[in-house]
Every structure is written in structure tokens, then in C-alpha cells.
Image (cartoon, coloured by chain):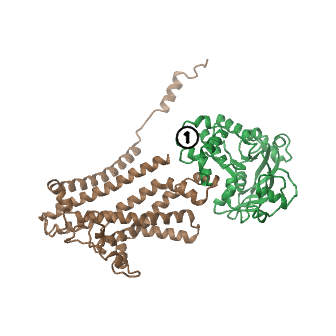
Chain colours: A brown, B green
Amino acid sequence: MISRLYDDKSRALVAASIERRRADARGLLFRSLLQVCLLMTLALLAVLLLTVAFDSSEQLTTRLWDFLGGTLRSQSSDDKLGVHQGIYGSMWIAIIVALLAFPVGIGGAVYLEEYAPRNRFTSFIEVNIRNLAGVPSVVYGLLGLALLLNGQFFGLDRFTGGRSTLSGGITLAILVLPIVVITAGEALRAVPVSLREGAYGVGATKWEMIRTQVLPYAAPGILTGTLLSMARAVGEAAPLILVGAVTGRLGDNPGLFEVSALDDRFTALPIVITSWTQQSGRDVGFATAAAAAIVVLLVLVLIMNSAAILLRNRFEKKRG
Amino acid sequence: MTDEAPRLIERPTVATVDDDSALAQSTAAAAPVTQTPDAVFESRDVNVYYGSFRAVRDVTFDVPRNQIMALIGPSGCGKSTVLRCYNRMNDLIKAARVTGSISYRGTDLYHERVDPVEVRRRIGMVFQKPNPFPKSIYDNVAYGPRVAGQKKDLDNIVENSLRKAALWEEVNDRLKDSALSLSGGQQQRLCIARAIAVDPDVLLMDEPCSALDPIATARIEDLMQEIKQDYTIMIVTHNMQQAARVSDTTAFFTADTHSENDTRTGILVEVDTTQKIFSNPSDERTENYVTGRFG
């Protein structure tokens, strides 16, 4: 039996000493401040989405399929006005970026993280790649102009056909390359040392260790990074203007999977949006068309990001 | 291999070894000098450096075959570092450098013609924290044989390895489940199964029970006793009772503190039978440590 040690007086003293005395005002203030930050972000997004949805509603409800299948015209009242060429351009740019930037970028990252010796030269290279990721996109447009249109250095203009979807795609692939290297490198660095040691410990070679442990483990992270960089490429306008994206009127209207049109004159959704917005001063009807094009681009990016998330979840499930 | 092996020999010392080992046969033929009849490893003046920092100084001792040798000592005395020299795990740390010589059945492990990948197939390792691969239980055990090029008979290898590791009864109905769904103790036994699936000669265990509860620890200790007729085992442990319980021989390490730059270098104090180390050690530092007066 334990005797009661405390009389009523000492218990009252203890109760008083641990009683809540004042509200945590600073904590509450900090919390509300954070809420305001979040709300501001959401509010801006809401304003954007609502105005765009409102402006675009007429185009998208009355003539959705005509709009999706239509082309760049000089009058907004034209029945054939639409974004088909923009979808074609943006879609193929995304494909070209995936085919060029992903393997090269991921390969470069694997070499840099796993094989390259740690010395001043490699850290110099790493710093430069980080800097390249911050270079304004217009500069990459100039690179594309020199390399792919004017054919300086390698005469690549004969291959790309000059001002073409191909040139646009390659330019944007170069633009996102540093981002792919950085994000893939970060995913590779996150692979636990214990996994590497485990593989080495039972006699795996370096290549086997990378193929069976490092790459599968890093795959979700690599995928997220690369697909976000693809979304960035699809949203770029400035470099495409420099490699000759058409802003005014474009006659050709290739089928979505017509590969032969890749070296023809092209446009892309961000260009369509820019150009229609500019023209809305002269011809008010273009404003609603631009809003509708924004909706199409947003949907495209949304589809790509959802695909990225789905794929990542699948890889993560595999990782266990 | 038979032609190659003699060229790898730097110090021909070990004579008595397995008859079925081609490597050993040629060694024995080249140098019939007997020093310690049953040594699997002989290390001589081993120093390990991290950059310019010397982590371990002048370690010299032999590891007897088919026994369990415990490496004990206070934190930071370099016992894990020493253990990782035996399967060239220190190679993976860029700044690490090993001098002196470690011979495995008479062949210098650090000779330029020695392939660390082959070394690790013969000298397996179990790590401090259970590190199963994020794959199925089956694929974990089959991993080593697969990278060694084995394609047939994997089912048998997996079953035998899991049986040896005393895990088969618990997992045989869910071999396809993720290894990460196992408990910590089961994961560590899985790692032991994974290590013995490549049929190594030696098992290096780096504090294999430090993350486990007493029951799981006891299972692993029993397991070590069962498998020691097939393997030579070296175990690093912080737990002196564990060393006393499981090992045949014990090496006691301690750390030398350098007052000028406050760095510590691991040194080997003494190696002897476990019974002697714990009842009547020759060195005062060992006695202080095993009686709990220091460390």
C-alpha cells in the first residue's frame, strides 16, 4: 500500500503551477501568417482559373471540336480558327524532349554520381550544370537559332529543316537537360548506402549494383523530376519564337501523328496563346480564343503530371 | 586459376588449408611453411587511413578457420574498420587506404591482381542494420547467386539458405512477399541467408544484433553456432556477453587518443581464446574493459 503523500494544500499548489495561464499568442500569429501565405497562393490560382474558364466557356462549349481541330487564322471570327497545330507542336516537342533529354540527362547524372572521380574538376562541372539550369530560356533559343536554323558548327539545319517542330523540340530538350541531370542526380544520391553495401557484400559488380539496386530505387524520383521538366518544356514560349515558331497564320494542318510534318513550319500552344493575346487588341474575339487555348494547354500539362504521378506510384509500390 | 594463383602470392606462409581449393593447393605447393595451421586470414601491420588520418594502427593477428572470432572494444576503436578490410569493403570509401598486408588462405587480398568482387563472393558480410533489398524474400536470397551467373537450381539454393538461417519455417508460404514486411530480427536472418546463398568461405558480421531485441539476438547467436562448422565467422560486437557466449577467440581493440589534435587511432591490444580474454587477460587494458572498469 502506498500512502497518500499529498495533502490538499500541496496538491492545489502543484495544480496551480502547471495550469495554462496565457494563450500562446505568438504561436497563433505565426500559424495565421502561414495560412495567409497559403490562401494568397490559392487565391491567385483561383482568379487565374476562373477568369480563364469564364473567358473560354463560349469557345469550348459551342465549338469544342472545331476549336481543337482548327488552325491559326488571321480573323477571330473565322470558322476554322483553332489550336490543332499548337497541340501537334506541343505534343511532339514533349515527345522529342523525352526521347533526347531523358536518356542523355539521366545517363550523365548516373556517370556524375556513380563513376566520376570526386575532384575539383567534377565539382566545377556540377556547379556549371546548376548554373545552366538557371540560364534564361531565351539564351537557349539563341543557341537553337545558331545550331539548328543557321546551321553553324555542324550544319544541322539540313536535318531539322530549319524552322520546324524538330528544331523547337531539340532546343527545348537542350533547355531541360541540366534540370534532368540535377533532379536525377538528387534521386541517385538519395539511394541508401546500406543498399549499395548489401549488393557489394554478396559479390555484385558496380554495374550490377547500379542496375539492380540504385536505378530501381531512384526511379520514382528520377521520373518525377524528368516529367516536371517536360511540363516546363511544354510551357516555354520564348525559345520557340527564336527558332521560328509561327505566330500569325499557318496553313498546314497535319494529323496528330503525322511524323513527316516534323520538319515543317510549326507552332506550339504557348506561342498560340501569346500571339492571340497580342492580337486581341485589334480583334477582341482573339481574347476568348486565347483563354480557350490556355485551357487546352493546362489540360495537356495536367495529363502529363497525372501520368507522372501514376508511374511514380507504380515504381514506389515496386520499391516496397 | 591454378596458373594464376602463384603469381598472386606475396608472402607464402599458410600451408594447411582445404584440399578442394585450387587456390590453396597451389599455395601449399609453393610454400610448405607452417605457421598457424588453421588460419584463414593473416593480417600483418595493417594500417587504415582516411585521407591523412590514421584510423587503425599496426594490426597483426590471425583468424582461425571454422571458428567464431569476436572483435571487441570501446566505440571508435576501429574494430568495424578492421573487419571491413577483410572483404575490401573499405575500397568503397574514396578516401580510405589500407597498408600492410592481409592474406586470405595465403594470397594477399590487396594484391593488384585480386578482384574485390570475387573476394566478396568468398567473404560475405552481414551489416549492423538489417539491409534487405526492397524486393521479395525470394529475390533477396537469390540475388547473390544471380549476380554470380547462377540461373538453375535457385529454388533449392533459396530454400537451403533460408533453412540454414532458421527462417524457412517462418517464410516458406510467402516467399514472394516483400522482404521489408518482415520484422527486424527476421530481416537480419534474411540478410544472413542472403550472405550464405553464395556459399562463402567466411562470414563477416558487423554488430549484427545491435538493432535486435534479446529474443532475436538469441536466435542469431544459435544460428552462428550451427553454421560455424561450414564457415569461419568474424563478428564485431559491443556486447561483451555476446562475445563471451558465441566466440572461440577474441581480439580486443582500444583507441589511442592523441592529445595534440584530439584524434583517435584504433590499436589491437591482444588476441587470445575467448576464455582467456575474459578470465585471465594478459593486458591490463583488456582486463579493465572486460570487467567493466573502462569503456
User: What is the residue that sits farthest to the front in this orientation?
Assistant: B152
Q: Does the image show residue A28?
A: yes
Residue B83's spot in the image, x, y percent? 71, 52
Which residue appears at 30% of the width and 73% of the height? Answer: A263
The N terminus of chain A is located in which quarter?
top right
The residue type indicated by label 1 comes to: Leu
Crowdedness near tag 1: few (<14), some (14–19) or many (≥20) residues, C-alpha within 10 Å: some
Quarter-wise, where is residue A297 in the image?
Answer: bottom left
Residue B38's spot in the image, x, y percent? 83, 50
Quarter-wise, where is residue B278 in the image?
Answer: top right
| Nearer-the-camera pick, A266 or A15 | A266
Quarter-wise, where is residue B216 in the image?
Answer: top right
Subunit under mark 1: B
- Side of B133 where B288 appears, left or right: right
Residue B265's spot in the image, x, y percent? 74, 57
- Side of A121 where B226 appears, left or right: right
| Nearer-the-camera pick, B294 or B164 | B164
Q: Does the image show residue B131?
A: no
Which residue appears at 64% of the width and 55% of the height? Answer: A203
Q: For the residue labelled by badge 1, is the local secondary structure a helix, a strand or a loop?
A: loop
| Total labels drawn | 1
Residue B14's spot in the image, x, y percent? 83, 56
User: What is the residue that sits farthest to the top in this orientation?
Assistant: A1
Which residue appears at 34% of the width and 56% of the height? Answer: A304
> Which residue is tagged 1?
B175
| Nearer-the-camera pick, A151 or A119 | A151
